[in-house]
Amino acid sequence: MEKVVVVTGANSGIGLALCERLLSSDSQVRLCLACRNMERAEAARAALLTSHSSARVDLLHLDVGSVPSVLGAAEEVKTRYSRIDFLYLNAGIMPNPTVDIRAFFKGLFSRNVINMFATAEGLLTQQDQLNSDGLQEVFATNLFGHFLLIRELEPLLCQPGHTSRLVWTSSSNARRSAFSIEDIQHRRGKEPYSSSKYASDMLSLALNTHKNKQGLFSSVICPGLVMTNLTYGILPSFFWTLIMPIMWLIRIFTNTFTLTPYAGAEALHWMFLQKPESLDPRAKYHSLTSGLGTNYTEPRIMDLDDEMTEVFFSKLLELERAVRRNLSEKTADSEHYQQYINRT
Ligand SMILES: NC(=O)C1=CN([C@@H]2O[C@H](COP(=O)(O)OP(=O)(O)OC[C@H]3O[C@@H](n4cnc5c(N)ncnc54)[C@H](OP(=O)(O)O)[C@@H]3O)[C@@H](O)[C@H]2O)C=CC1
Ligand SMILES: CC(C)CCC[C@@H](C)[C@H]1CC[C@H]2C3=C(CC[C@]12C)[C@@]1(C)CCC(=O)[C@@H](C)[C@@H]1CC3
């Protein structure tokens, strides 16, 4: 039977590598590439069809960082498909990153060096901004847009007698100390990326608590450190070229340096092959690469607090109501405006 797989942020990096791997391993897959830039989406589709000429690859316009776009895309999905088997919540941003060079060299000569390379703890800050919906951009893109998409697609994701799966591309950079329940959008801090990824870990757990009975299962993965547009944006490109041999050397000593999008997509692809009942809702599944270059997936228990997770889930539902209210007021305003224009 055909399996409908929707992937957000599918036009490059880990998302595109996942699509390639899914088509190579299962001829029943019907892919839907959900992307904000249709030119790049077309190019990704063309690349996939070059190696899989008979594959079914659909395109969907989705800017996950914009509420109207998410609502429009969800409507489109509901007209196209009767159910969704897998929804990969992969699109993500890390805008204006800064590396703390002093902290890097301090960490390099400390006992924490392996952890520093695996998680970038204490190394990275970002500068966030408000988007057109009045939300913090990183939170809106990495988390809230995906949450709204799930909420809108519930009729396709929660169907009697059928199991649907959500897979979040989280990160080992997700840290509880970067997240504040009083400031879920991370308006005040300097680590919006880490906060948004920790938020996705909590949301996945909450969705399992609330939706497993309806046949919806959620998991989180970390792709490891992968060289993609996101990572190339962290340092100037000449710098990456300079340190690239060192990165491949480090790969021998730490299994989290997956480096290629193919290897980074390991856990995402592995998820596709697992029965949801066999997965631990409190674990993050890591793509890892051994010193000899073998890719594998390993679970690690996440640092989650049940009470905070539930409070966070209620806050998201509250924010969803506020966002919808705001949107319908705007629509009503523009209808009044249109009526006024028509009268004059
Ligand atoms: N690379 C790494 O080392 C790691 C990456 N990750 C996560 O992996 C995921 C994929 O990133 P990666 O492949 O590395 O980087 P890329 O930048 O290559 O991919 C990110 C994808 O997300 C899309 N995207 C960004 N913003 C939006 C938006 N508003 N609406 C729709 N699509 C959007 C991008 O589209 P466009 O081309 O239009 O920008 C792109 O297709 C992210 O969630 C990232 O946080 C996690 C841990 C490590
Ligand atoms: C000499 C230089 C200053 C060297 C700088 C190296 C850093 C740029 C990298 C060291 C660990 C890396 C890392 C990430 C980005 C690049 C580093 C900070 C991530 C934060 C990328 C995105 C993720 O989600 C994480 C899993 C990565 C963790 C490691």
Image (tube, grey):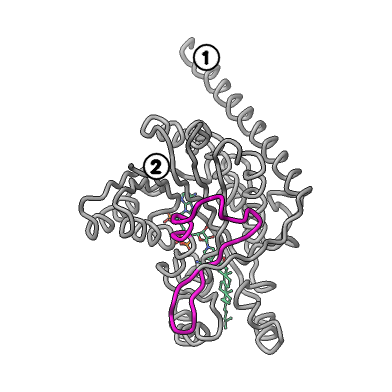
> Is residue 314 shown left or right of residue 200?
right
The residue drawn where x is 35% and y is 47% is 31
Q: Quadrant of residue 108?
A: bottom right
Question: Helix or strand or loop: what does disc 1 sit on?
Answer: helix
Q: Residue 61 got which mark?
A: 2
Cβ–Cβ under 8 Å for marks 2 and 1:
no
10 Å neighbourhood of mark 1: few (<14), some, or many (≥20)?
Answer: few
The residue drawn where x is 57% and y is 59% is 170
The residue at which mark 1 appears reads as 340
- Measured as percent of width and height from the top left, residue 101 is found at 64, 80
Q: In the image, is residue 39 above or below residue 251? A: above
Q: Amino acid at mark 1?
A: Tyr
Residue 61 part of the magenta-drawn span: no
Question: Helix or strand or loop: what does disc 2 sit on?
Answer: strand
- Measured as percent of width and height from the top left, residue 307 is found at 79, 48
Classify mark 2 as within 8 Å of ligand 1 or not, answering yes or no.
no
Residue 272 part of the magenta-drawn span: yes
What is the span of residues highlighted in magenta in the rendered image? 268-296
**What is the C-alpha distance between the residues marked 2 and 1?**
32 Å
Q: Is 22 or 233 nearer to us in this picture?
A: 22
- Measured as percent of width and height from the top left, residue 69 is found at 47, 38
The residue drawn where x is 44% and y is 54% is 272
Q: Is 243 or 143 nearer to us in this picture?
A: 143
Quadrant into which the N terminus falls:
top left
Q: In the image, is residue 63 above or below residue 13? A: above
- Measured as percent of width and height from the top left, residue 268 is found at 47, 59
Front label number (2 vs 1): 2
Q: Residue 293 got which mark?
A: none
The residue drawn where x is 42% and y is 57% is 15
Q: Earlier in the sequence, mark 2 or mark 1?
A: 2
Q: Amino acid at mark 2?
A: His
